[in-house]
Image (cartoon, rainbow, N blue to C red):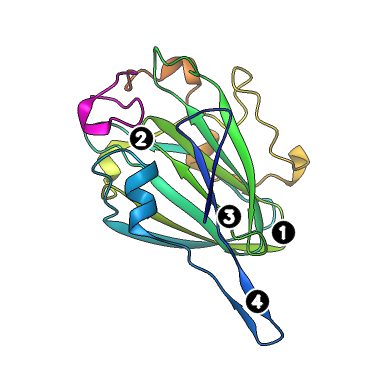
Amino acid sequence: MKVIKTTIPEVLIFEPTIHGDARGYFFEHFRQDIIEKHLPAGTAFVQGNESMSSYGVLRGLHFQRPPHAQGKLVRVVQGEVVDVAVDIRIGSPTYGQHVAVKLSGENKRQLWIPRGFAHGFAVLSETAVFSYKCDNYYNPQADGGVRYNDPAININWMLPENDIQLSDKDKNLPSLGEINCFRYTLSPAFEHNGNEQ
């Protein structure tokens, strides 16, 4: 498995080695030793989720507030999405910047979104099955979000605006400037990157 750095050092792409022939294919999509080497010290996944969405559906940008913040390792089982991670850690050298990566059932890439980042995706194919692991449990009282079209972030969602489908909740999320629940620090507990305390 290849680990690829993005323009934000803490956000990583995991690209598997795929073994295929006329019968089908095989690949490893998770290895604990690679997690321990490349993700923040102590990262342990405790919850896995899967969703199915149709073309044009945009989910995000979402996060959970401390102390319930989550890191996510995300992938697409079927279809294609553009997946986005936004640094919302005040004081971070990459605050307000984002990474956008195409994930698909064909390329089988995964994206690591650390704690302190907002996450969202938009479906580019007819349908997409989205699967992800979290390093903290879902807590509805800790829900937070950032508006998908905030000009301060300026994300290209690779969809015509008229095709974008949002939930009522996501239509009413605040702007990046209204979010202040994360601070950029270097913690011994997460020695590989900066995370909130």
Q: Secondary structure at mark 4?
A: strand
Which of the two discs, 1 and 4, sits closer to the camera? 4
Q: Which residue is mark 4?
A: 20
Q: Main secondary structure of the magenta part?
A: loop
The x, y position of residue 16, in whole percent, is 55, 59
User: How far separated are the C-alphas under marks 4 and 3?
Assistant: 16 Å
Which badge, 2 or 3, is on the more N-terminal residue?
A: 3
Q: Is residue 75 left or right of residue 188?
A: right
Which of the two discs, 1 and 2, sits closer to the camera? 2
Q: Nearer the viewer, residue 131 or 170?
A: 131
Residue 186 lies within the magenta run: yes
Q: Quadrant of the C terminus?
A: top left
Which of the two discs, 3 and 1, sits closer to the camera? 3
Residue kind at label 4, given as amino acid type: Gly
User: How far separated are the C-alphas under marks 3 and 1?
Assistant: 16 Å
Residue under the point 23% across and 43% down: 42
The x, y position of residue 3, in whole percent, is 52, 46
User: How far separated are the C-alphas under marks 2 and 3?
Assistant: 20 Å
Tags 1 and 4 in contact by the CB under 8 Å rule? Answer: no
Which badge, 1 or 4, is on the more N-terminal residue?
A: 4
User: How far separated are the C-alphas under marks 1 and 2?
Assistant: 28 Å
Q: Nearer the viewer, residue 143 or 97?
A: 97
Q: Secondary structure at mark 2?
A: loop
Which badge, 4 or 3, is on the more N-terminal residue?
A: 4
The residue segment tinted magenta is 184-197
Name, please, the residue furthest toward the bottom. Answer: 23
Q: Secondary structure at mark 1?
A: loop
Q: Which residue is mark 3?
A: 109
Q: Which residue is mark 1?
A: 125
Residue under the point 58% across and 33% down: 99
Which badge, 3 or 1, is on the more N-terminal residue?
A: 3
Q: Which residue is mark 2?
A: 115
